[in-house]
Amino acid sequence: NEEQTRQLSAYVASLGAGPTIPETAYLDTTQGDAANGARVFLANCAMCHNAAGAGGALTRGKFAPTLMGVKEQHIYEAMETGPQNMPVFNDANLTPEEKRDVITYLKAQEKNVSPGGMKLGSWGPVSEGLLIWTVGLGIVIVFVIWLTSRSA
């Protein structure tokens, strides 16, 4: 249960140095700045997690998971501990306020899932360019067929 989890966490924390459970003030997204969070996220996290937080492929068959639908505490703790291939963003790298801003940005992304129009998998310009080329080429082919059928 929750109490046993806290006791186990306290025991493990007594064995050596490490990050603590984040204070609730740093998990409150109403106090965060989503614009600053976007700046910090794009500079530090987007190369693996995608600018929309949708996750992405890494080298050697590894991947960065999606950050959509993840609890605020888990995001904060992941920044503190750096699970798997993720680097550690301790308080010397990112302040607790910047971490809260990143969480605020991600929660804003969850609410506004497609600020640019069609989502297209949130893969950025690759999927958008492919759609434009496919539709555009289809329109050109139909137009050419229509033109050649009129000249006969």
Image (spheres, rainbow, N blue to C red):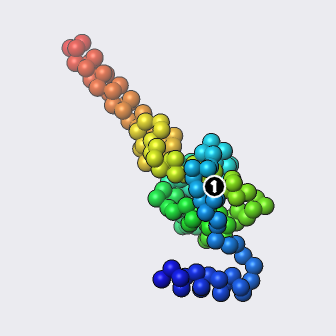
Residue drawn at x 64%, y 71% is 21
Q: Residue furthest top?
A: 151
The residue at the point 54 percent across, 85 percent down is: 4
Instruction: Note whether 148 is above or below 130 in the view shown.
Output: above
- What amino acid is labelled 1 in the image? Arg
Residue ranking furthest to the right: 92
Instruction: State left or right for residue 131 relative to residue 52.
Output: left
Residue at screen point 67% across, 49% down = 40
Residue 138 located left or right of residue 110: left
Mark 1: secondary structure: helix
Q: Which residue is mark 1?
A: 100
Place of residue 113 in the rendered image (x, y in percent of width and height, measured from the top left): 45, 45
Relative to the observer, which residue lies in front, 83 or 136? 83
Residue 85 can be seen in this image: no
Q: Position of residue 92 (x, y in %)?
A: 78, 61
Above or below residue 147? Residue 140 is: below
- From the viewer's side, name the closer residue of 58 and 35: 35
| Quarter-of-image position of residue 27 | bottom right
Q: Quarter-wise, where is residue 103 in the image?
A: bottom right
x, y percent for residue 151: 24, 12
Query: Is residue 121 among the parts visible in the rendering?
Result: yes
Q: Classify 75 as above or below 102.
A: below
Number of other residues with Cα within 10 Å of mark 1, as a class: few under 14, some 14 to 19, many 20 or more: many
> How many numbered discs, if any?
1
Q: Which of the image's four quarters has the C terminus?
A: top left
Q: Residue at x 72, y 76 (%)?
A: 18
Above/below status of 37 relative to 26: above
Q: Where's residue 41, x and y in %?
A: 63, 50
